[in-house]
Amino acid sequence: MATDLVDSDLTKKRRTESPHALPVVDFGPFLANEGCTVGDVPTAGQLKVAAQIDSIMSEHGFLFLENLGIDSQLLTSAFGAARGTFSQPEDGKAANLAPWAAATNGGYSALGAQSANRARPADLRESISTRTPRLACNDYRGTAAEFGPTADSLWGKLEDATRRFSIACALALGLPAGELDFFSRAFESHDNSALVFVHYPPCDFESGISDGSNSAGSIRVGEHADFGLFTFLFLESGAPGLQVRKAAEGEGGTLGDHKVPLDSGWIHAPGRGGGCAVVNSGALLARWTNDRWRATTHRVVVRNAEEAGEHRYSIPFFAQPDKGTTCAVHPLFVPIEQVVRYPPIAIEDFLQLKLKTLGGS
Ligand SMILES: O=C(O)CCC(=O)C(=O)O
Ligand SMILES: [Fe+2]
């Protein structure tokens, strides 16, 4: 009897810690310039991928996307540039890097400057946020030599990936053929999106706090849902710490404060490396679809002293619709017996409100 119990506990532990608990989708059919990526009828491959995306987004809100068109060499260079930049002495970074400002959402945020969940103290990370090179506003002073050119190259690829994934989402949601650009037309200039380089330095490990099982302490990133339409998150192979919750439990409409679920419903999502992105649905996707797809809550923790002793790097790309765009629920997402849950909102107002809740200026 006792042995059965031990076995079932172990099996349960292994299941919750299975290395790739999130579904993996091969985005290859949307990389080709054919079917709905060029305005024609979708190919059979695209329809199949769209059906997978709908089922996953409805249930999980998180997935791994392979073949997004981002070269793994470029990502290796980007992680190298992040390492080179963040490994400078602390006072050098504060003095030499351009500081982050909510008004531009660009620049360097030092350790302890931001809090993704205001119910917790500051997050245990530092970051550099970059904007599209088309805005010519990035101030790369103080970064490693390869940082700026690498970030600029990534931007080009990510803008294309955003267009393709936006079309895939429209198809997945069942929007009519003439409206498959429903989301992608909100990304003409990318003047709100952000590509961020994040560094989590080694931290103390306190059981019951660093692992997120207490709602009061600092963790690497507190519980939050991203603000935009969706996020492509790049992680190095095996990078531990990301935990996600199923979309059904998402918090698309909330701002700033997130209650901390302390149960076992967190799914571990270690990085797959290469050009594979973790994709998650943001608050605007929930608003735009009237919660047909929800924004997903996630966080970054350390589960033991070994993980706490490691540097961790991540590169999220936040696909945030252009200035001047309004997010108004499409009638397709309001069946007869349902109500419109979110009034139309100017993207700019929504994003500024959200950015201010992060802390900083
Ligand atoms: O670093 C990560 O793995 C996640 C970061 C994140 O969720 C965010 O910056 O919004
Ligand atoms: Fe996030």
Image (cartoon, helix red, strand yellow):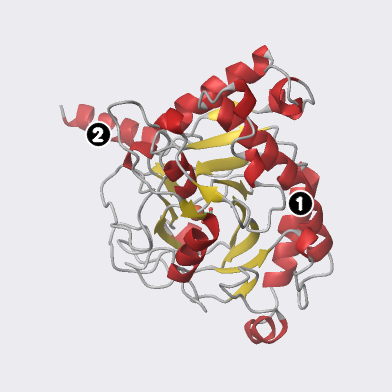
Residue at horizontal 27 percent and vertical 27 percent from the top: 337
Residue at horizontal 78 percent and vertical 41 percent from the top: 71
- Residue 224 vs 147, above or below: the answer is above
Is tag 2's residue or tag 1's residue first in the polypeptide sequence? 2
**Between residues 345 and 95, which one lies in front from this camera angle?**
345
Report if the beta carbon of the residue with label 1 is closer than 8 angstroms to ligand 1: no
**Inter-mark Cα distance, 2 to 1:** 47 Å
Quarter of the image with the N terminus is top left
The answer to whether residue 102 of the structure is visible from this angle is: yes
Q: Position of residue 262 (x, y in %)?
A: 26, 52
Q: Quadrant of residue 254?
A: bottom left
Q: Which mark is residue 354?
A: none
Left or right: residue 182 versus residue 294 is: right
Residue at the disc numbered 1: 154
Q: Amino acid at mark 2?
A: Val
Q: Position of residue 241 (x, y in %)?
A: 48, 52
Residue at horizontal 76 percent and vertical 58 percent from the top: 151
Provide the secondary structure element on which disc 2 rests: helix
Q: Quadrant of residue 194?
A: bottom right
Query: For the residue carrying disc 2, how many other residues have a C-alpha within 10 Å: few (<14), some (14-19), or many (20+)?
Result: few
Task: Residue lying at the far top in this picture: please name it.
Answer: 44
Q: Amino acid at mark 1?
A: Leu
